Image (spheres, rainbow, N blue to C red):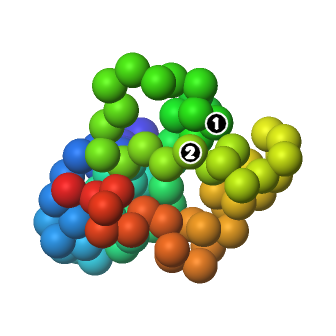
Amino acid sequence: LGVKTLVLECVPAALAKQVSQALSIPTIGIGAGVDCDGQVLVSYDMLGINTKHLPRFVKNFLKGNNDIKGAVNAFIAAVKTQSFPGNEHSY
């Protein structure tokens, strides 16, 4: 069976880049910088529903968008263009 994917959460971006380059499986980052193979963000955080303590990697994609679909599309576009996560969202 083995490992199919590795999630790197709150890992320093430079280390996440090294891990991603060293592995043949995809890495998924959450607060681990732009160099992971993919990104994940909890929907409550992405939509600004959670207003309590927010981890550094949270960005409210509903701001500036009219609806949930717009927020999700903005998240997808930001990941594809590597504008998210920025340095301010990474450790």
The amino acid sitting under disc 2 is Asn
Q: Residues within 10 Å of mark 2 (few under 14, many from 20)?
A: some
Residue 81 % position (x, y): 59, 79
Q: Is residue 48 visible to us here?
A: yes
Report the quarter where the C terminus lies: bottom left
What is the number of the mark on residue 60? Answer: 2
Q: Nearer the viewer, residue 53 or 39?
A: 53
Q: Secondary structure at mark 1?
A: loop
Q: Residue at x 49, y 48 (%)?
A: 59
Q: Nearer the viewer, residue 62 or 76?
A: 62
Q: How many marks?
A: 2
Q: Marks 2 and 1: CB-CB under 8 Å? A: yes
Residue 64 % position (x, y): 72, 55
Q: Nearer the viewer, residue 52 or 83?
A: 52
Report the quarter where the N terminus lies: top left
The residue positioned farthest toward the front in the image shown: 64
Residue 73 % position (x, y): 77, 57
Q: Residue at x 51, y 75 (%)?
A: 82
Q: Residue at x 43, y 44 (%)?
A: 58
Residue 27 % position (x, y): 39, 58
Q: Is residue 42 above or below residue 8?
A: above
The amino acid sitting under disc 1 is Leu
Taking the image as shown, residue 73 lies to the left or right of residue 63, namely right
What is the number of the mark on residue 47? Answer: 1
